[in-house]
Amino acid sequence: MKILVTGGMGFVGNALAHALLKRGHEVHALGRSVNPAKEKLLPGLIYHSHDLSKKPLSKHWFKKTEVVFHVAAKAGVGGKYLDYKLANLVATEKLLQTCKEYEVCKFIHTSTPSVVFSPNPIRGGDESLTYSKEDFSPYASTKSLAEQAVLAADDPAGMRTLALRPHLVWGPGDPHLLPRVVARHRAGRLRIIGDGKNQVDLTHIENVVHAHLCALDAMISNPDLGATPYFIGQNEPVRLWDWLNQVFAELHLAPLNKFISYKTAYNIGWLMEQSWKILPLKDEPPMTRFVACQLAHDHWFSEVAAKRDLGYQPLLSMEEALRKTLPWLRNL
């Protein structure tokens, strides 16, 4: 089967491309890197350097392609809304149109729980949650619009579409989550936000890839499956700050015990957002309202629908996932 993976040199996309190759598929990967790392180019992987948001799509990539995994996205907590819109929404709309033209059968979109972001805690949230109307985060806003475009493009007589919402993806090769947190702690710039008791989902990369493969298998076995989003997690939310202190202990770092109130962090986030709009600053603000909410509140979700429709269950528990990740973390 010919399969196209966008974001194929990224954390999730590359791991997924490798898993598809192991299944014997013809895998094409799109990525923005002109010279990607050699370890990401496994034998058999056909790579195309391409920026979905800026360049026209080459039609020959889609000839005889049966499945597209759309993993590419612009993630972050700062930056211009237009940049996120181009990378997350416009690129998705262009890709959907091309897939329809070339009669791609299945379109699986890597979304995010941030599409239902709320400044209030979410506990056991399911797919009945409505799309967020908050404008705190250009990432969340544009990913929400992109997911809605994907699900609206579902056609029972043509291309079927699904959206997967993995939460806080981590594991060996993670370019964002744990490395940044560990670096901030080592620099003495990390604080517990709120009371430190909030529970969150974190999803190991192996479980995320497994969920994508489950989605593909489910769509093949059930032609009626489509136009549906699914939360993907570990099915065992953890107390975020206790779990991070467990990680720090494994890395022989001092425990984090300095606090800042949620209200203070939220207000600092607002001030930093305004400053970054005015000043010519290129790095991301260290705090935003979105980040304050995410780090202080419960946000964990139900995997009941994914288990029922996709046959998804985590391959690794949180304990197993941490054990597999620690050797990599220790070498950072």
Image (cartoon, rainbow, N blue to C red):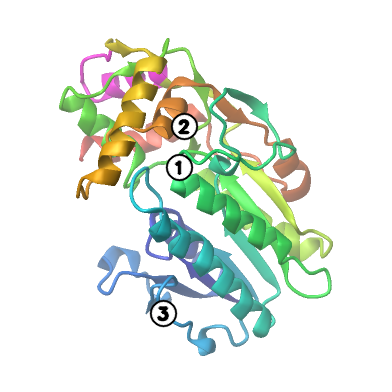
Residue at (75, 38) in percent of width and height: 128
- Closer to us: mark 1 or mark 2? 1
Q: Is residue 127 above or below residue 164?
A: above
Quick one: label 2 or label 3, which is nearer the N terminus? 3
Query: Is the residue marked by circle 2 packed among few (<14), some (14-19), or many (20+) residues within 10 Å?
Result: few
Q: Which residue is outermost to the front?
A: 278
Residue at (46, 32) in percent of width and height: 320
Q: Secondary structure at mark 3?
A: loop
Which of the 4 image quadrants contains residue 93?
bottom right
272 left or right of 210 in image: left
Query: Is the residue marked by circle 3 packed among few (<14), some (14-19), or many (20+) residues within 10 Å?
Result: few
Q: Secondary structure at mark 2?
A: helix
- For label 2, the residue is 320
- For label 3, the residue is 55
Q: Is residue 313 above or below residue 52?
A: above
- For label 1, the residue is 137
46 left or right of 235 in image: left
Q: Secondary structure at mark 1?
A: loop
Res 26 seen here: yes
Label of residue 219 in the image = none
User: Which amino acid, by three-letter code, is at mark 1?
Assistant: Ser
User: Which amino acid, by three-letter code, is at mark 3?
Assistant: Lys
Estimate the x, y position of residue 20 in percent, counting from the top left: 53, 65
Residue at (43, 77) in percent of width and height: 44
